[in-house]
Amino acid sequence: MKIPSPNRRVGARGRTLSGFPRPRTAALALAITSMIGIIVGADAQPPTQSERPVAEWRKVVNPIRRDASMEARIDGILSGMSLTQKIGQMTQAEIKSITPEEVRAHFIGSVLNGGGSWPGKNKHASVTDWLALADAYYAASMSTDMAVKIPIIWGTDAVHGHSNVYRATLFPHNIGLGAARDPALIHEIAAATASGVRASGIDWVFAPAVPVVQDMRWGRMYESYGNDPALIRTYADAYVRGLQGSFGEGSALASVKHFLGDGGTDKGKDQGQTIVTQRELVRTHAQGYFGGLRAGAQNIMVSYNSWKDPATGTDHGKMHGIRMLLTDALKEKVGFDGFLVSDWNAIEQIPGCTKSSCPQAVNAGVDMFMVPDDWKAFIENTVRQVEAGEIPMARIDDAVRRILRVKLRMGMFDGKAPSEHPRAGDLAALQHKDLARRAVRESLVLLKNDGALPIKPGARVLVVGKGADNIPMQAGGWSLTWQGDETTNEDYPEAQSLLAGLRAVAGDDFTILDGTRVGAKIGDYDVAIVVIGEKPYAEMKGDVAWPAATTHSLRYPEDRELLEAMTKSGKPVVTVFLSGRTSYVNDLLNFSNAFVAAWLPGSEGAGVADMLLAGAGGKPRYDFRGRTSFPWPGDPCASSFAPAVLSATPPRFPAGYGLSYARPKAVPVLSVSAKQSCGAR
């Protein structure tokens, strides 16, 4: 909803172009002016010209056009709904905290499963268990006493495949896919993900993430495809088209996230402050949304971060409360007519709000509220706030209209339960091993090779390192659990560790020696593959907090110690580095004859082996094509990707770097910094 300003142009039939009646009396004009105070905050003033959306917020033509008959149908549904029913549609609860009966009784519009949440709290729940729960929620939503029954929608963080579900294929995380530079691959992965979530009864995927990361300290860096806005825009377009298509059978709702500037927080602090001008906010951080909307995106998730504009000196606060961005810019100037969903309990971070109460966020433009556990109190509080005049009824109607519009566009009113859709309950719809293995091959980046690769047939290959037979490490965060921890190889029965992948590819042409077991007898070998890297993490726990240096060996000294020990044998050392970020690794490069950035490759370890072990005649099976989508630092304190920082402290490897067998290049012995701290802020 847009409150008319004194300068707003007036449209036909006595209405402003925002849809509100033209004030005909001074008293009515005064009443509307008073409403501004309610909507933007009692102490706030209407935005100044410098705080209004800038020209770079341009109209995006969405391929899914407004349909007059559908809008009339929505009018009819809205006219028969009570206030409580409307607020219920704006509410999203966590499956651990709501039963199907509660969905029915409170007219709930949406549920979600967070990371580490499964049907029956069973980490090994089958696809049919997921489907049965989806059917139960759907049946509950269709058995209310509403005049028109509104089907529930279920959202999930299927961010690299259907990654919360047991036995599903895990694709490489976004940082690796960005290195592949292949939009067609992204389209295929998104389509495969859609088939998996629909098979389990879920309709909505909280992806793609489109942050343009500006600092490697950020613990969510691996959720980003890179720091090039153009690449992000292209990938967002490809992902949304692959996941949603034209909302046919097997497609799912995409959620482009997190709006806006989540990857630009100062020094990479999770949920921190992004300090950029509005123009830079659009030019750098909004490009993924332009790409996603151009492809037909119907949902956008709002970000935890806050925003300060140094050009105006304005601290706008948390994104969930910034009406100028959510409504004025995104909904009105850009023309987004889908709905906005909040992030997990994010509304409580707005001053004056709690987990269950935030009229500021409603008035700013958030349409659906992810209030996982406090959903019942949220409904009660919001109903009371509307009745008290803190939230205009028109804003509630706008939010529900947007939610209904998306559900209708998705075909959710077709009367089919989740189990009635094609491939429902089919485990094979969650498994895409060949596609994932190809994605691994395309994502790997060769940073160094002095002739150690490819490894020739007949070689005795020693495999060591904490990541060699460790599927949780190669899967990373958002894999069965939120942080990707509290899991073992046994939790991934369909997956293949790097060691298992090497054995499978080697066949009888190589001898693979397992040096990962305690007390293993290493014996004689020709070349060592050392698999090291980061242990699983997600947001918050993954941050490298300022002022610590970004040197990998400071956080994982055991990796340096192992590599140093391996070099003493005099045999070639091939390092495979598992990571969700670029880090300072000069010391590790010096200990390696070849160094492969494998990122977080997911469940198909054979994709790595395909690139390391030569085929017939000693020729490479495949050549490396991956190119870094982020700079790789040449100094442990140069964590920012800002142009001024990169100019003053050139990266060890710039974005776009990557060797291949066809294009070798020597990497000299590198100087190694002993910095452990980057000094005072």
Image (spheres, grey):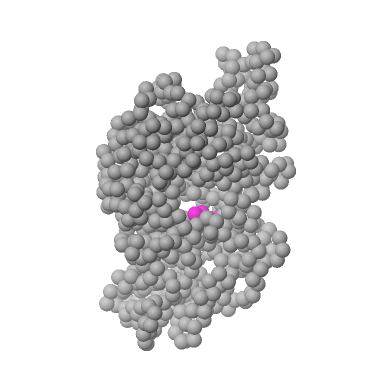
Magenta stretch encompasses residue 224: yes
User: Taken as a whole, is the magenta stretch helix, strand or loop?
Assistant: loop
Question: For residue 108, which quarter of the picture?
Answer: top left
Residue 385 in the image: above or below residue 652: above
Residue visible at 63% across and 57% down?
Answer: 267
Residue visible at 45% across and 23% down?
Answer: 82
The x, y position of residue 500, in whole percent, is 33, 70
Q: Nearer the viewer, residue 167 or 359?
A: 359
The x, y position of residue 312, in whole percent, is 73, 41
Magenta stretch encompasses residue 358: no
The x, y position of residue 279, in whole percent, is 65, 43
| Quadrant holding the N terminus | top right
Q: Nearer the viewer, residue 81 or 337?
A: 81
Residue 283 in the image: above or below residue 524: above
Residue found at the far top of this picture: 25
Whether residue 181 is visible to the viewer of this picture, yes or no, is no
Whether residue 183 is visible to the viewer of this picture, yes or no, is yes
- Left or right of 37? Residue 335 is left
The x, y position of residue 398, in whole percent, is 51, 27
Q: How many marks?
A: 0
Residue visible at 30% across and 39% down?
Answer: 135
Q: Nearer the viewer, residue 121 or 458?
A: 121
Segment colored magenta: 223-227
Residue 295 in the image: above or below residue 235: above
Question: For residue 69, which quarter of the picture?
Answer: top left
Residue visible at 51% across and 36% down?
Answer: 378
| Quadrant holding the C terminus | bottom right
Residue 587 in the image: above or below residue 114: below
